[in-house]
Image (cartoon, helix red, strand yellow):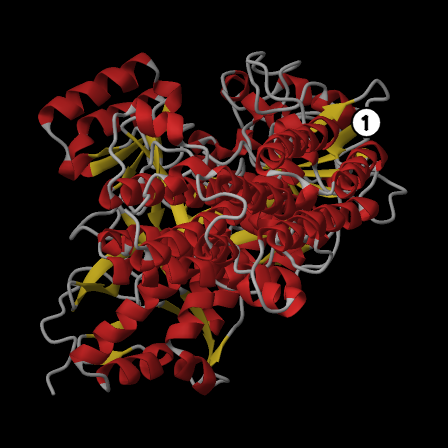
Amino acid sequence: MMLSRVGEQLYWMARYLERMDNTARLIKATTQQILDARHPADWRAPVEILGAATLFDGRDLTARESTVMAFLIDDPCQPGSIRSSVRAARENARTVRELVPTDVWEGINELAAVMRDDVIATSRRRRRLDFLRHLIATNQRINGIIEGSLSQGPPYHFIMLARLLERADMTSRILDKHTSDRHGHGGRADGWMNTLHALDGYLMYRQRMGAGLNPQSVVDFLMLDPAFPRSVRFCLRGMRGSLLTLPRSAPVLAEVQGLDHRHAEAEPHRLDPGELHCYIDELQTELADIHGHIARHYFPEPLTC
Amino acid sequence: MKSHFHGYDNHPFHDEMLACPVTPRPAARPLYDTVQGMDRSTLSDRSRALEAAIDAMGITFTVYSEGQNIDRQWPLDLVPRIIELGEWQRIHEGLCQRVTALNHFIDDLYGEQAVIRDGVLPADLISSSRNFREACRGIKPAHGVWAHICGSDLVRDEQGVVRVLEDNLRVPSGVSYMLENRHVMKRIFPELFANQTILPVDDYCSQLLDTLGSLAPAGVASPEIVVLTPGIYNSAYFEHSYLAQQMGAELVEGRDLFVDSDDCLYMRTIAGPARVDVVYRRIDDDFLDPEVFRPDSTLGVAGLMRAWRAGNVAIANAPGAGVADDKVIYAFMPELIRYYLGEPPKLANVPTWRCMYPDECDYVLGHLNEMVVKPANESGGYGILVGPRSSNEMRRQFEKLIRSDPRNYIAQPTLGLSTVPTLIEERFEPRHVDLRPFVLQGRRQHVTMGGLSRVALPRGSLVVNSSQGGGSKDTWVVDMGGAS
């Protein structure tokens, strides 16, 4: 049976990989949106979405493209930067590499090599997009290997748990930023389109919701769609499925099921922008609580020195 | 095209590949021809491909430098060290004999100590040995075996004689690099592996698993085996993780384990405590159990020795096995082999002077500038004086050290280690090598096919340790099918 410490390390490996992937998608979508924008570019938006505004302001940084990109991609002292996420994923993977297919480890090494060799090019937009695509593609390859070659035992399910929790959190952040914008609910269609693009959900949304783009249905889709892999509900259902296979999971399972239930009852797509913002705050707190339950229940006691 | 070996000068040392610069030894002929058939740019391509493969496979080692742990790419040279099967079989037998004798010896030391009673070994040698563990007296491990994994370093002198330089019985490392070197070489030189019989090395991990399984407490049908590592910052962590993965064993740290009031060992899993039957430990005795050894150790497991004594868990290598790592004990190995097995040693020692004996000590002090002086209980190539490369000041220091603690020093003549062509800035130059085969001993014995070849990269250097700038080579035991 899997060691508690190993469970924790797999969990963090998967969370940091997913965070890196989501951050790369967000930067990519933001860059593309700003190229199209008629109003002044809002380079501060991704910093806020990623919850790094306090650190950003504390350093007296200005929201210029080059500053924000360096801060989000390359800054080793910014815990949410792509560089920090890749490093943390690799540090955690190092200690559990005997449990995952060798190609997963090679993929993570490739991420580290990309960070080492190509990051310099990110100040130029075209090169930056190539760089981000490379990161995302590498991570998707890692995910593919995990799907195709890792037995669906406890290590797999800890990875899923972590990936889905991180993803639900990110989806809610991106949505929140949009709703609290001055263009918010009922705002401009290109803003909503960008939200869907940042979550790679544009095509799936079109297929599910048909023509037209209205705020209610975007919120419905990203919050409650049972089939879109980045919707909050899909993530919660996936976590539930993984917990069902894990030993001693009943208390955590109850928390996730409770949240899934409350989330559906809340009908977030019917909320007005102010209510939705409050609701998303609550949702994020609850997701953080689920992490706390997983940690207390499965992870070893922290070392006391 | 000019020969790649034009100007190659290994004089006066034995070269493993070339009998003279234009004639390869028979077992090295296919490699020699292949290399000669390549132009310089093809060779550079292969060399780059090799480094790229090591990078992609994430083969690293850790060095501790200036207060930081740095992960470095594992250094592997393009040219393998080649041994003809017939010669390897003789070495194989010598290693089996040696490890058998070593285990008899350790079992005797912690048992009735007949070897001292019979006057073969001076009693004070043991009482003053840093690695003799009083706590192990009277314990009877499975099969009477204490050293389950032994890495003995072999060298070849100018006369072509293969000798044992030292035995490593505590936590010998390097076997994962032997295995990975072979993976890389198969990627880089597939044609050479297709066209001749290079004997495979890849059964090591299943042999290790078999060996460890054979140590499990009686009545355990499918034993739970764990690899105990000091953690990610240990220089051999790559190997700990690699071996655990290959064996399908859990890689655990001390904090993952605990001994319960039933004197059994458990690991903390997501499903609750799970019983552990065999520990392949990669931490030193000192840190193994704070109840018995160093009380400040956080790497080990409190109560582990209790569980071991009670026979509820097996530990490999057994605590206390490092007593035979002592380089003074090494000097007695020929006598010990005769004493325990009644036969002459099949593998020679390097002539060794023991400073504990006044006459030998005088000789050493009189010849410091020609000898290699080693402390009895260090590893990793630390604390060594290489006489011919030392300053007056260093020799004065060592004279003081030896005089203050003669028991803990031995000296050996400076060996002219054999060489293998090594790619140095796109040219082949002779570089000195040693060889570390690994011997497994449980219910059965097993020797790796070849071993890890280490190479000293600076010109003229004899220091092969990777922590001190050494590199490595793949080792090919070549079966010529009677054609030699």
Q: Position of residue B285 (x, y in %)?
A: 57, 26
Which quadrant of the figure has residue B310? top right
Quick check: B409 left or right of A252? left
Quick check: A296 left or right of B404? right
Q: Position of residue B68 (x, y in %)?
A: 33, 30
Local packing at callout 1 (Cα closer than 10 Å; few below 14, some 14-19, many 20+) is many
Which quadrant of the figure has residue B320? top right
Height in image: B252 above or below B417? above
Q: Position of residue A58 (x, y in %)?
A: 31, 22
Q: Position of residue A267 (x, y in %)?
A: 73, 43
Q: Residue at x 56, y 15 (%)?
A: B294
Q: Quadrant of the N terminus of chain B?
A: bottom left
Height in image: B380 above or below B429? above
Please name the amino acid that badge 1 sits on.
Answer: Cys
Which residue is outermost to the front? A186
Front residue (pair B416, B299): B299
Numbered disc total: 1
Query: Is residue B166 visible to us here?
Result: yes
Please state the chain letter of the residue tagged with numbered disc 1 in the rendered image: B
Query: Is residue B452 visible to us here?
Result: no
Q: Residue at x 40, y 42 (%)?
A: A46
Q: Residue at x 25, y 74 (%)?
A: B45
Front residue (pair B108, B387): B387
Q: Which residue is mark 1?
A: B264
Q: Quadrant of the C terminus of chain B?
A: bottom left
